[in-house]
Amino acid sequence: MGVGLIVALLSLSAGVEKTAGELIHIGRSDFGVFQSDVSDFSRSLLPESLAKRVATISGVAETAQLKLFATEVRGQSSFFVFGLRPEEFVWRRLVLIQGRRPRGNEALLGDHGARRLGLGLGDDLAVAQGKRFPIVGIYHSGNVFEDSGAVLPLGVVERLANRPGEITTVAVALRPGLRARTVAARVERRFPGTVAVYEPGQAIKVDTSSRLIVDTGWIISLLALIVGGIGVTNTMAMSVVERVREIGILRAVGWRAWRIAMLIVSEAIGISLLALGIGLGLGVLAAKQFSEHTSTSGLVQPDFTAGVFAWGLAFALGVAVLGAAYPTWRAVRLTPVEALRRE
């Protein structure tokens, strides 16, 4: 259970950071401004007027309004449509690789999204409420998150989301030579209730669901470490009690204390490695189930990095060492004569 929790929570945390890294740098922006303490990024709601006010902050070169709308397209849930204004820098930085610029209620489709959906020029993008938008261009932005979705005019996406006049984030481009951290702090001081996210590690300041996952997960994992350690301690202690005479014979024929200790510890590690294999599988399944059936709206997908599995291994070995400590101490203190006298 402990290994599974470690793998699940760390993979989701890594997924939050990965998504945040893509979302806050849409259009090659330097940082994004979000509503603070929302359940996930897509639920941030800011007034359109905020973009112009952010643009007046010292160090800000340009701002762009962005509305993120999750919908189902061709059986794929949580397909993201980006609402943008054609005159702002995020839209201008889209590289059109096929077709033409849209006019009116026409759509652009990202090249990754086009391959995933099997759609192309001349097809219709069918979204929520039975709305259909002709695809007149295929774009590439260099941002995987953006290239996996579609672009429509901001007003159209606001109507689809039933949130006229409200956007998800303000993308900010800085003047040359300035640090994102400095300007982001100015924005947060000027507009309380917002968070200026300039690096993925800050994502947890916005996404309260992920914050709850991480905080709760670490607490439960700590408890699992203690309980798991007690379980392994009990198992190995019983093993030592049942094999006192065997240990005595080994000591009598010349085994040193460190060899006896290695015997006990290696058995504890074997138990923990078995738990590691089962726990990794449970963790992967739990993380995928969470991302598919919760309010993250498909925005966060678990990211199973080498570091995630390394932490799972470290946890399992920690339980092994913790659980083997007392039985090992007890075993090495047995003298051959004392051990052989026991029944």
Image (cartoon, helix red, strand yellow):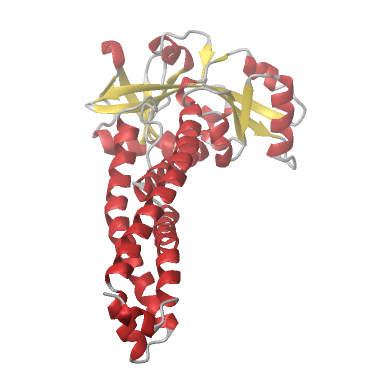
Residue under the image location 26 percent in, 33 percent down: 117
Residue under the image location 54 percent in, 35 percent down: 203
Please tell me in which quadrant of the rendered image residue 261 appears: bottom left
Viewer-closest of 128 and 331: 331
Rendered view: 4 above or below 113: below
Question: Which quarter shows the C terminus?
Answer: bottom left
Please tell me in which quadrant of the rendered image residue 101 appears: top left
Q: From the viewer's perspective, is 4 left or right of 75?
A: right
- Image mark count: 0
Rendered view: 222 above or below 70: below
Rendered view: 299 above or below 260: above
Q: From the viewer's perspective, is 48 left or right of 178?
A: left
Residue under the image location 47 percent in, 12 percent down: 155
Q: From the viewer's perspective, is 239 left or right of 93?
A: left
**Residue 73: x and y, percent?**
27, 25
Q: Residue furthest right?
A: 58
Viewer-closest of 209 and 219: 219
Please tell me in which quadrant of the rendered image residue 29 appears: top right
